[in-house]
Image: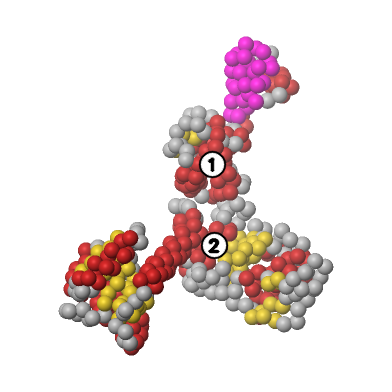
Amino acid sequence: MAKILVVDDELSMRDFLGAMLGRQGYEVSTVESGEAAKRSLADDAFDLMITDIRLPDIGGIELLEHCKRASPETIVIVITAYGSHDTAVEAMKLGAEDYITKPFNVDEFGIIVRRSLQRKQLAEENILLRRELKREHGFENIVGKSRPMLELFRIIERVAATPTTVLISGESGTGKELVARAIHFSSPRAEHPFVSVNCGALPETLLESELFGHEKGSFTGADRTRIGLFESANGGTLFLDEIGNTPVSMQVKLLRAMQERRVRRVGGTEERPVDVRMIAATNVDLEKLVSDGQFRKDLYYRINVIRINIPPLRERSEDIMLLALFFLDKYASATGSLIRGFADSARRALESYSWPGNVRELENAIERAVAMTTGEAITAESLPSQIRTSTPPEGMEGIHIPDGGFDLESYMEGLRRLYVATAMEKAGNKQTRAAGLLGMSPRSLRYLLNKYDLR
């Protein structure tokens, strides 16, 4: 319910406007002077102030200026006498939302109030949307406290303020697009589009049309003119993911577009200017592709202006549980789950796994665990099998290597013989059951029984 402040020195007008606006569902306060209005603005938050231009103490224009300083989120509608056009223009220049001329039509008055409040609501929603976009794509979603990640944050902050081309490298699943989005939404281009394309997901003919667009009739199936991603990203950022998979013949056209900042649609003759910041990403060794003749050297130099390398998860193990808790909160909140944390068994499994799929694999694992867990803590049993089996045995977390070293092979052989013997004893010398306890086939167990002379 919007809150409205009515300022008028005539009691009858205050009562009339208060009753009319109250019937329309607004919460209305009325005051008789400019000074009283100032006190009300200081004591409460109003969505809208309606004020007469002529007040007994201070003028409505002065009150308008005070409101814009003291409560800039409050919109103002001024009421002017018939024929006071210059005063109304002055009020609009000073920030009034609208003006109403006496005598006014009641229905028209209600429409002006409603539309003014709707515009205010849309403006506030737009601000909230922008904040949400920045929260969703900004630094908050790049989680880490390790030294490599702190350095990554510093680089993103420095790079975001510049228009420079960036090349992001890293293994699959490390979050290259997440970093690209953080750069964009922290840059002066944040209000403009962020457009992403996977250069390896499309054949060459479609990739050219996707990037540069095409004219109607330029090829079979081109039944209408279509703008490309370069034009779609105009003013913003174009993210070329897996650029190392771009066909060599397309690399020439891509290089020209980046250098000239102009594109020509497939089947067209006109070149169109584009203002686009380029961010590229790769999970392969571009230098090797260049030496092998599979990637143009001039394009490599063009995109490799600022290089950002994202470390794999196995090289920042101190971030694993931080990320796991982040994803737990994300999926538990989305599903209404009451899961609060991780059991020790799950922590050991998560921290000892090598994470070949990096952050993407970790997120998938936590999403699965949230779906599979019924209690208040995620246990190892809720994690994928490849993660569970990577857990070191209970009590082995603090292993010690003597200063003089030791024979690891002999030690492991002795340990293996001990486990085989213990499993046979626990299984009552039944080989099939003992093999099941050790997670191996009966044939493999028989081999070890013979090797260690345990028959």
Q: Which residue is mark 1?
A: 366
Where is residue 245? Give x, y as percent. Answer: 72, 61
Quadrant the C terminus occupies: top right
Image quarter where the N terminus lies is: bottom left
Q: Is residue 424 magenta?
A: yes
Q: Closest to the observer: 90 or 449?
A: 90
Residue wearing tag 2: 181
Q: How is the image coloured?
A: secondary structure
Q: Position of residue 285 (x, y in %)?
A: 67, 60
Bin the neighbour count of mark 2 within 10 Å (Cα to Cα): few under 14, some 14-19, many 20 and up: many
Which circle's residue, 2 or 1, is located before the other in the chain? 2
Residue 348 appears in the picture as rendered = no
Q: Residue at x 65, y 69 (%)?
A: 229
Give the magenta range. Answer: 411-439
Q: Is residue 303 magenta?
A: no
Q: Main secondary structure of the magenta part?
A: helix
Front residue of 416/258: it is: 258
Q: Which residue is depicted at the point 67% across and 64% down? A: 243
Which residue does the image show at 27% across and 74% down from the upper left? 51
State left or right for residue 249 relative to residue 352: right
